[in-house]
Amino acid sequence: MKNQSVSSNLDWISVFIYIILVVLGWLNIYSSSLSSTVEDASLFDFSQTYGKQMMFIFFTIPLIFIVLAVDGKFYEKYSSIIFGVALLLLVGLFFFGKTIAGQRCWYAIGGFTLQPSEFAKAATALALAKYLSDVQVNLKDVNKQIQALLIIFLPVILILPQPDPGSALIYTIFIIVLYREGLPAWYIWSGFIAIFLFVLTLVIEPQYVILISFIVIALIYLKSRKINRNIIASGIILVLISGFVFSVDYVFDNVFKQHHRDRFNILLGKEVDLKGIGYNTNQSEIAIGSGGWLGKGFLEGTQTKGGFVPEQHTDYIFTTVGEEWGFLGSFAVIALFVGLILRVIYLSERQKTKFSRVYGYCVAGVLFIHFFVNVSMVLGIFPTIGVPLPFFSYGGSGLWGFTILLFIFLKMDANKVNEW
C-alpha cells in the first residue's frame, strides 16, 4: 500500500462543510444565549453558554489531530475493545451517573458533564463494520442477523432505562446499513408497518385497524399468483398484527412516560396545550414562521431574544436559524447537511474494503437521522424526544461525538485504507 500524507489525501470538501456547520452552529448558540444576557458581553465569557461552546470547539481541534494521527487500521483492529469500553461507560451511568432533568445520562467531571451515548455511536458503528466485514458473515443467515442486531441493540438496552429514548432511537438507523449489506427487506418493511399501525391505533379504534389490515391482506392474497398464495401464512400475519394492535394501548399507557404520551397526543391533535407540553413546539413554529424569506437578521430575532423557546440553544437551535436567517438561510443550512451526508455516501461507495465502506454508511446514517428528526421535531411533524442537531446544538459531548464519528471515516479514506 502506498503511504501518502493524511493532509494530501484528506477529503477537504467534507472538512470545509464541517467547519462551516460548526461556525454557523456557534453563531446561532451565541444569538440564542443573548436572550438572557447583556448584548455587550465578552465573546470569551466562559460562564455563558456561547463561551462554553467556544471552549468545546477549541478542544475539538486537538481531538481531530489525534483521530487523524492514529493509523486507520487501528480502528478496525481494536473496534471490539472500543465497543466494549463504550458499553461499560453506559453501564457505569447506573452507578456513577449524574441525573439532569430526570435523565441519568451524564458523568460529572468537575464543572462539566460528558454523555457517553454520544461517543457510543462511533463505537457501535466500528463494531458493526468489523462484524459485517468478516468474510464468513452472511446476513441471509438467521444466526448472523441476530448477532448483527445484538450489536445494535446492546447500547439501546442500556440507554432506554436512563431514560433517553431520543438517543436510543438514533441507533435504529444502523438497521438500514444492515439492509444495504444484505439483510432481508422484510425487516425494514415490518418496522415501517409496525410504526404505521402503532400511530394509526392511537388515532382510531383497534378493531377498525384490524379490519383495514384484514382487507389489505385479503387483497394482496387475491392479487397474488396462485402458486404464491399461502392462506396459512396470511392468517399468521393477521394474527400477529391483531396482537400487536391490541397491545398498543397497554404500551402507550404503561410503558411510555406521561410526557411522551402528551407529546404524541399533541402531535396527533388529540390535545391542544399551547401553554404546557406543546409550548416549545408552538413557539418554535411561531419563531420559524416569523422569519419569512430573508429572516429578521442576526441577533434581531424577537422570539429568540425574548427567550420564548426554552432550551433554544440545544434541541431547538434550528428555530434561531429560521427566525433570524429566514427560509433562504434555513435552506442553506439544510443544503449543507444534505451535502455532507451525500459526500460521505459518495466516499463510502468508493471504498474497497468492506469495513471502511460499512463504517461510512453508518456515519451517513447517524448524521441523517439526527438532522431529519431534529428539524422535523422543531417543525412540529415529529414528537419532541431530545435529539440534537449535529454541530449546531450546544454541548461538548455531542460536538466531540459527531467529530470523532466523522473524522475516523475521513482518516480511513485519507490513509487509503481502501487500497489493497
Image (cartoon, rainbow, N blue to C red):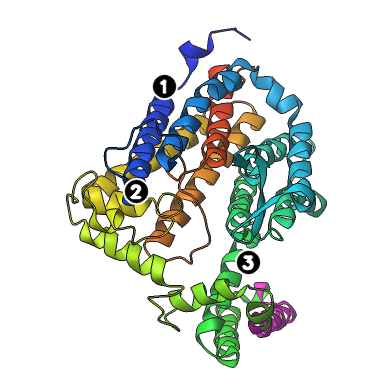
Earlier residue among tags 2 and 1:
1
- Residue that carries the numbered disc 2 in the rendered image: 32
Indicate which label's residue lies in the foreground, 2 or 1: 2
Instruction: Give the residue at x 60% y 15%.
Output: 69
* Residue 183, position as x, y percentages in the image: 67, 51
| SS type, badge 1 | helix
Which residue occupies the foreground of this view, 351 or 165? Answer: 165
Based on the picture, tell me whether residue 232 belongs to the magenta stretch. yes
Instruction: Give the residue at x 30% y 44%.
Output: 38
- Residue that carries the numbered disc 1 in the rendered image: 12
* Residue 167, position as x, y percentages in the image: 60, 53
* Residue 415, position as x, y percentages in the image: 58, 16
Rendered position, 378 above or below 45: below
Judge from the rendering whether residue 176 lies leftward or rightward of residue 156; answer left or right. Answer: left
- Residue that carries the numbered disc 3 in the rendered image: 190
Mark 3 and mark 2 in contact? Answer it, CB < 8 Å.
Answer: no
* Residue 43, position as x, y percentages in the image: 35, 32
* Local crowd size for mark 2, using a 10 Å CA cut-off: few (<14), some (14–19), many (≥20): many
Magenta part of the protein: which range? 228-249
Based on the picture, tell me whether residue 92 belongs to the magenta stretch. no
Rendered position, 211 above or below 241: below
Which residue occupies the foreground of this view, 123 or 340? Answer: 123
Residue 256 in view of the camera: yes
Earlier residue among tags 1 and 3:
1
Judge from the rendering whether residue 214 lies leftward or rightward of residue 94; answer left or right. Answer: left
Rendered position, 12 above or below 219: above
Most frequent secondary structure within the magenta stretch? helix
| SS type, badge 3 | helix
Cα–Cα span, label 1 and label 3: 39 Å
**Looking at the rendering, in which quadrant would you find the C terminus?**
top right
Which residue occupies the foreground of this view, 12 or 295? Answer: 295
